[in-house]
Amino acid sequence: MTQNNTGIFIALGANLSNPKDSFSQALAMMEKQNIAVERKSGLWQSPAWPPGSDAPDYLNAVIGVKYEGSPQALLATLHEIEAALGRVRTVRNAPRTLDLDILDFSGQIIDSADLILPHPRMLSRGFVLFPLEEIEPKWIDPVHRQSLSDHIARLPMADVDAMHRVGPL
């Protein structure tokens, strides 16, 4: 399978405050930072992690953007937007007002202290794979050279069954 990823994809997630409003504000802030949103998935609802936690369900989405800077500069801008919208980084998997993750940056493979691309956990997360499939069904994993449908087929059925598309972004 040939590598043909030319897009930049960002995952959005939130389960505190008003996630839809946070997403709208984040998209507006991205546009002001020369991150042009070209494609948007629908909103997907998924249970909080870890299973059994008392945290509210998450809303998730994936966007395709055009950006002229480096992956590192994009990450720094996304972290600024998260902070501006109330994100406080505490422990891993903690509930949050907004999470913005670069999933893929034009098929680049990066493994540095501050950035790993493609996103290291995206292939096991239905809340990333399903929205990505909506906007880029032919996406190919640049590391394993496998299709998005291959990765979706490997998801545990419990994860698949827990996913619900709840409307437009």
Image (cartoon, rainbow, N blue to C red):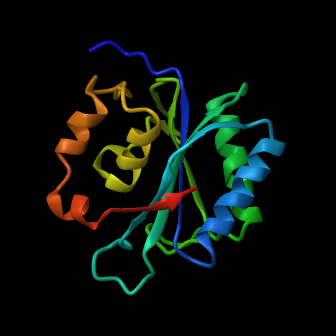
Q: Residue furthest bottom?
A: 54
Q: Residue at x 26, y 15 (%)?
A: 1
User: Is 20 left or right of 86, judged from the image as shown?
Assistant: left
Residue 112 vertical placement versus 51 (above, below): above
Residue closest to the eye, 15 or 114: 15
Res 142 quadrant in image: top left
Q: Residue at x 38, y 43 (%)?
A: 120
Q: Residue furthest right?
A: 32
**Is the C terminus in the top left, top right, bottom left or bottom right quadrant?**
bottom right
Question: Where's residue 141, x and y in %?
Answer: 34, 29
Q: Residue at x 18, y 64 (%)?
A: 158
Is residue 121 something one can see in this rendering?
Answer: no
Res 70 quadrant in image: top right
User: Is 116 left or right of 151, judged from the image as shown?
Assistant: right
Question: Where's residue 165, x and y in %?
Answer: 40, 60
User: Is 135 left or right of 17, judged from the image as shown?
Assistant: left
Q: Residue at x 46, y 69 (%)?
A: 58
Residue closest to the eye, 61 or 70: 61
